[in-house]
Image (cartoon, rainbow, N blue to C red):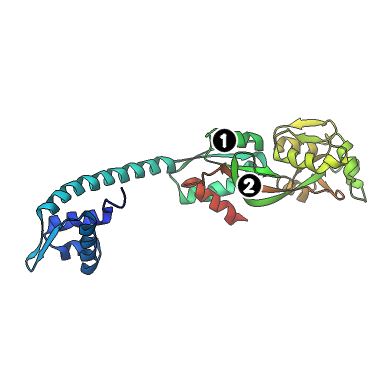
Amino acid sequence: MAHRVPDLAALQLLLAVARLGSLGRAARELGITQPAASSRIRSMERMLGVSLVERSPRGSTLTPSGALVTDWARRIVEAAEAFDVGAQALRGRRDSRLRVAASMTIAEYLLPGWLIALRGNRPDTAVSLFAGNSAAVAERILGGAADIGFVEGLRVPPGLDGAIIGHDHLVVVVAPAHPWARRRTPLDPAELAATPLILRERGSGTRQVLDAALADHGGLTAPLLELASTTAAKAAVVSGAGPSVLSELAVGEELAAHRLVKIPVDTVRLGRDLRAVWPTGQRPAGPARELLGLTRGSG
């Protein structure tokens, strides 16, 4: 049908000619040259197979066929305008809120800065934030409960697309009074795997990376404690409860203040990617796309 029906620009031009009685004035109103307007009318006439406009020194008038086509054109243009108004309303409703889901480390240590910057650009957008482990974030995105998510780990969760927005490194940390704090040599991966640790729960990006890193060294032994937040795990280590493996982003302040000590580990990869994620095939739009841009700019 598209090749048999004139486009909206041609129909709007015809309506302007009918209203103004002049092809030249219609062209000026629409911001095009008169030759371009004449060419557009001729193309429409060829498409429809009828003459639409009669030109004379006194102006331009519609032929009987042109008057009939103009009546149809008016209804099409009005419908298009209603469509545009509706689409703008949908965009406005979408842009009025942003639902974000983020894994704990990103939610606590990176998102606040990104959201402050977003609010500067979009003060009228209401933002809600769900903070959980990476598995829970993926569930919310797949269930339609969030517009964009942020996870840590080794790969994009199934059913989602993603983009790397940064990198993080896990470090072994202990309280200054812990025996490991006085070591002169790096920790052996097998010793780390065999030591009861203060760990994040299964499903977290931190646990996923640690499980994979120590799989070839006997795997993790039963945890000393299993906690659902990085802040809780960090507090337990600071109190002297035992060692942990946590995000370098999360423990920077404690390391600088000597409340925690970083323990080197031999020949084990503890790096991970930080990703923005969204449903497969559905690129972020509106505030979600703007937030994604801010995260990339921060790196």
Tell me which amino acid carries mark 1: Leu
Query: Looking at the image, which residue sits at the far left?
Result: 58
Quadrant (top left/top right/bottom left/bottom right) for the C terminus: bottom right
Give the foreground label among 2 and 1: 1
Horizontal side, residue 230 vs residue 182: left or right? left
Query: Looking at the image, which residue sits at the far right?
Result: 184
Horizontal side, residue 71 vs residue 175: left or right? left
Question: What x and y, as percent, mark residue 96?
Answer: 43, 41
In the image, 42 versus 216, the foreground residue is 42
**Marks 2 and 1, Cα distance to the nearest angstrom?**
16 Å
Crowd band around label 1 with a 10 angstrom C-alpha radius: few (<14), some (14–19), many (20+): some
The residue beneath circle 2 is 275
In the image, 165 versus 48, the foreground residue is 48
State if disc 1 and disc 2 touch (CB < 8 Å).
no
Horizontal side, residue 226 vs residue 16: left or right? right
In the image, 255 versus 43, the foreground residue is 43
**Residue found 31% across the figure and 43% down from its top:** 83
Q: Secondary structure at mark 2?
A: strand
Of callouts 2 and 1, the N-terminal one: 1
Q: Is residue 174 visible?
A: no
The residue beneath circle 1 is 142
Question: What x and y, as percent, mark residue 56?
Answer: 8, 66
**Residue found 71% across the figure and 38% down from its top:** 230
Q: Secondary structure at mark 1?
A: helix
**Residue found 22% across the figure and 69% down from its top:** 35
Tell me which amino acid carries mark 2: Arg
